[in-house]
Structures are given as structure tokens and as C-alpha cells.
Amino acid sequence: MSSIAVRRRVQLTPAKRIRRVIGYLLLCIVALGFMVPLIYMVATSLKPADQVFTTPPTLWGDQLRWENYVEAFTFLPFGKFMLNGLFVAVAGTTINMAVAVLSGYAFSRIRWRGRNLVFVLFLATLMIPQDVLVVPMYVMMQQFGWVDTFQALIIPWAFTALGAFLLRQFFMTVPYELDDAARVDGAGTVRTFLLIMLPLARPSMAVLAVFTFIAYWNSFLWPLIVVNDINALGTIPLGLQSFFGQQGSQWHLVMAASVISMVPTVLLLIVLQKHLVRGIVTSGMGGR
């Protein structure tokens, strides 16, 4: 133990210490750059309405108005927007993960004719911008009679190639010897998938869950197009837009509602934190 400690002390030369300090300083500066807008948002959410824009500008008002958070729920049905957003995000994330894990397993572990060609075509859909798909998708929703429904908010974007790509890349890193061992023990394809592959894929599924949930939670363009009754089906972005009206912009309420809207995503990141680092490392790795 003493030799290892001496070796570590010898390796930490003054030049390395300087580089480490500089690295920490740069990280702190970058972190501060990301935190400044958040700090300003929280500070503005606690200001009185007449002190949001002052000359010279100030970070905090002369009093902290915690009532702004209560008023954000009473000024508009913001609680309804939160529930709608949670329902759409959770339902869309669940469907997307189910489709992604099944298709990723089929593209990586099951051998069938034309698999690679179908995967390339499936992956090519990622090159199509969402803005290009809005018009044909809206026409399709009209033909289905789904305009102004939750189905239109959830279904169109639940079947994407990104999740299949992430899960396929992970499954390609799993040794095929596990499949052979499961087959020797009498397990079929379905049992191997449920008992072996699915538990191993939890980190990658956590990454996909976070990306998909945030995408649904922050989606603005598609809900704006497909939702007519905002009070009944509006999500968080539409609810925030509703604070800007003919009576003026309620910036203190917008900031308060924005802080509230961050809570579900922060909680999701905290719950899945232990899986995220490992999932990000394994999801993008190439396989066989």
C-alpha cells in the first residue's frame, strides 16, 4: 500500500496539478454558464410583476413573492396542463420503449432475410426533418378522426428509429454465448429475451426513456397544430404560451410556471441517475 501511495504522489507532478486546476476552473465556468439562465428564471419567478423589467436590472425584487407559484395555477388551468403533459409523455415513452426494445432485439439477435436492408431503410427515416412530416401527419390524423385527441399527441411520434438504433447497438455488444447457453437450458427466443436480454438492457432503456420523455414533455409544434381545445388537451408548452395574451405578458407567472414544469424531468433524472452513465456508454458502442 505504501509503494502505491508513493507512486501516486510521484505521478502528480506540479505541471499535472496546474492542468488539473485549470480543468476544474474551465468546468466551473461552463457550469456557471448553464446555471445563470436557471438562476435568473428562479429569481424572476419570485419578483412582483412591476419589478420584472427595471432600470438598472436587478436579480431579485424587493420582496420574494412565493404567491406567484399559486397564481400560476389559478391564472390558467396549469394543473390540467401538467396532468396532460405527464399523461402524454408517460404514454408516449412507454410505447416508444416497447417498440424500440422489440425492434432492436429483432434487428440484432434474430437472423432473417433482408434484416440489414430493412434496418438501413428504417434508420434512414431519421434523416427526415420533423417539420417535413407535420403536414402529411396532420392529414393522416384528420382521416383517422384523431385531431384534438390524445391519440394524435402520442401515437405519431411513438414509433421512431432512434430507440431501435440505440437498443440494437446495445444488443450487438452482448456475447452470443448467452443465447447459446439459454438455448441449451431449453429457453426459446421469447424467454431468452425476457429473462436475459431485457434485464441487461436496463441502462440503455433508461437513456432512451429520458430522451423520449423530454422530447414529449417539451414538444410544442405538433401539439400546437393538432390541438384545438387548449384548456382540455393543452400540454406544458401550450400552457406557457397561454400566459402571453391580449392583456399583456405575465412574465413573473411564465417564469414560475417554467420552474414548476422542470420538476418532473428533474425527478426522472434523479430516479434514473445510476443507469444513465452506464447506458450512455453502452448505447452508442458498435457491435459485431
Image: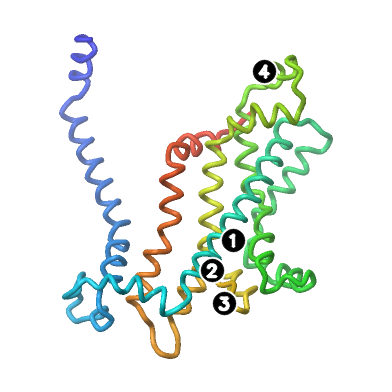
Q: Nearer the viewer, mark 1 or mark 4?
A: 1
Q: Which residue is mark 3?
A: 230
Query: Looking at the picture, which amino acid does disc 1 mark?
Result: Val
Q: Nearer the viewer, mark 2 or mark 4?
A: 2
Q: Which residue is mark 2?
A: 235
Q: Are marks 1 and 2 in contact (CB under 8 Å)?
A: yes
Q: Residue at x 51, y 69 (%)?
A: 81
Give neighbour class at mark 3: few <14, some 14-19, many 20+ (Cα, 10 Å). Answer: some
Q: Is residue 159 left or right of residue 84?
A: right
Query: Looking at the picture, which amino acid does disc 4 mark?
Result: Glu
Mark closest to the chain's N terminus, 1 or 4 = 1
Q: Which residue is mark 1?
A: 88
Numbered-mark total: 4
Q: What distance separates the C-alpha of mark 1 from that of mark 3? A: 14 Å
Q: Residue at x 39, y 69 (%)?
A: 257
Instruction: State the image quarter where residue 84 is shown.
Output: bottom right
